[in-house]
Each structure stands twice: as structure tokens, then as C-alpha cells.
Image (tube, rainbow, N blue to C red):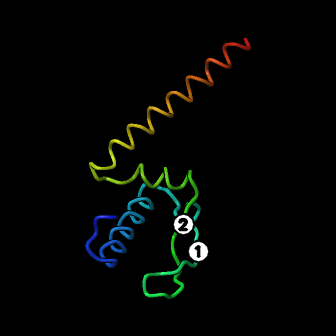
Amino acid sequence: MTEQSTPRGATFYWGKLKQRLKEEGSELLTICQQLKMLAEDGKMRQTDVADTKGILRIIQSIPSPKAEPFKLWLASVGKDRIDEVVDDFEFYL
């Protein structure tokens, strides 16, 4: 989204991404909320915002090859965390 040449291009890309998430069964309304933020034109405009979990879910749906390194990192961190939980569980057995 950051490489869009115009704000309209970014808006279009975000719209397509939201559509893709909806088709995948993700309810964006539960991921994103609206927050008024100051826009470049000086006006307060409604902007989609999300918490950390929501942002990570959105990133998982980005089809760009540029998102792949981040997706791989997320998978690695997720695996490490699962391994920690399993190790902790086995320790208490």
C-alpha cells in the first residue's frame, strides 16, 4: 500500500484487500475499527485502524511477494512460541 502513487490508489488497494479478507471468511468489522485522524488536507477523516492481532491477520492476507519475508518471520515466531508452550507443558508432566 505504501508504494501507491496516489491516495486513491492506496484506497483502492485497501478496498480490494478488505474484499479478499471477507471472501476468506474474515470479518473485517471485528478486526478494524474507525478512528478520526488528521488527513493531509487538514481535515479529520475516518480511518481504518486495527490492533496488533488484526494487523498481523491483515498482513497474512497480503498477496505481495514483498510481504513474504514478514510472513515467514511470523511463522518462525509462531513456531518458537508453540515449542515454548509444549516444553513448558512437558516440564510439568
Determine whether the residue tagged by mark 2 lies in a helix, strand or loop.
strand
Apparent side of residue 61 relative to residue 86 in the rendered image (left or right): left
Q: Residue 61: x and y, percent?
A: 39, 52
| Mark before the other along the chain sequence, 2 or 1 | 1
Q: Residue 6: x and y, percent?
A: 29, 77
Q: Residue 86: x and y, percent?
A: 61, 20
Mark number displayed over residue 76: none
Residue at 51% over, 70% down: 48
Residue at 52% over, 63% down: 28
Task: Give the amino acid type for the residue marked by disc 1 in the picture.
Answer: Leu
Q: Quadrant of residue 18?
A: bottom left
Residue at 38% over, 37% down: 72
Determine whether the residue tagged by mark 1 lies in a helix, strand or loop.
strand
Q: Quadrant of residue 29?
A: bottom right
Mark number displayed over residue 35: 1
Extreme residue toward the right, this view: 92
Q: Which residue is mark 2?
A: 49
Q: Quadrant of the N terminus?
A: bottom left
Q: Where 49 sits versus 37, above or below?
A: above
